């Protein structure tokens, strides 16, 4: 599940968490960051300052990220692993999906399809090598 750090995306994770719990599966959440890519939605959780040196802030950031996620989305007994990637969002999601041999990619969609909206969704739908579930955020 790609996550941009916004409460809206966290809320949309509900169906993915429920599926993972029912299937006794692990939930992999990837936060893809880029230069100037901070979300503007109130309550958003941005990436650590030093993404190029994950040993400094990454463990504390990932723990806080999961705590915030659990406060919005019922995670139950689902094991959550958080990944941080940097670069073009769709390409990084595809790369991680292939590397981790994921069974399903879950995407939160805000309901707008016209350009330049939904570029990540469109690219993943076009290139995915596994099933995709789209959840309306």
Image (cartoon, helix red, strand yellow):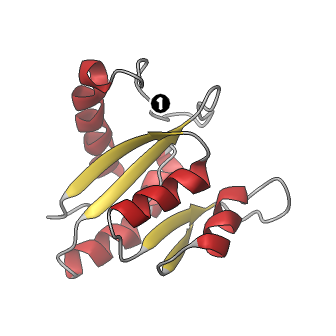
Q: How many marks?
A: 1
Q: In this view, does 15 lie to the left or right of 35?
A: left
Residue at horizontal 61 percent and vertical 67 percent from the top: 124
Q: What element carries label 1?
A: loop
Q: Position of residue 102 (x, y in %)?
A: 35, 70
* The N terminus lies in quadrant: bottom left
The quarter of the picture where the C terminus appears is bottom right
Query: Compared to 117, does 125 lie above or below?
Result: below
What residue is drawn where x is 25% and y is 41%? 67
Nearer-the-camera pick, 25 or 14: 25
Return the x and y of residue 100 as percentages of the image width and height.
32, 63
Measured as percent of width and height from the top left, residue 9 is found at: 50, 53
On the question of residue 21 being in view, the answer is: yes
- Snapshot quadrant of residue 41: top right
* 40 on left or right of 86: right
Give percent across and percent down for residue 110. 65, 60
* Residue drawn 52% across the image and 45% down it: 4
Q: Closer to the camera, 19 or 72?
A: 19
Density class for disc 1 (Cα within 10 Å; few <14, some 14-19, many ≥20) is: some
């Amino acid at each position: 599940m790609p996550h941009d750090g916004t409460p809206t995306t966290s809320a949309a994770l509900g169906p993915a968490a429920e599926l993972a719990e029912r299937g006794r599966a692990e939930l992999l959440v990837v936060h893809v960051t880029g230069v100037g890519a901070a979300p503007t939605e109130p309550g958003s959780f941005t990436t650590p300052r030093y993404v190029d040196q994950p040993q400094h802030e990454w463990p504390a950031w990932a723990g806080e990220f999961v705590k915030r996620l659990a406060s919005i989305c019922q995670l139950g007994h689902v094991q959550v692993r958080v990944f941080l990637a940097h670069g073009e969002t769709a390409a990084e999601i595809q790369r991680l999906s292939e590397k981790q041999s994921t069974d399903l990619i879950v995407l939160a969609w805000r309901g707008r399809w016209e350009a330049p909206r939904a570029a990540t969704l469109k690219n993943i739908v076009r290139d995915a090598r596994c099933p995709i579930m789209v959840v309306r955020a």
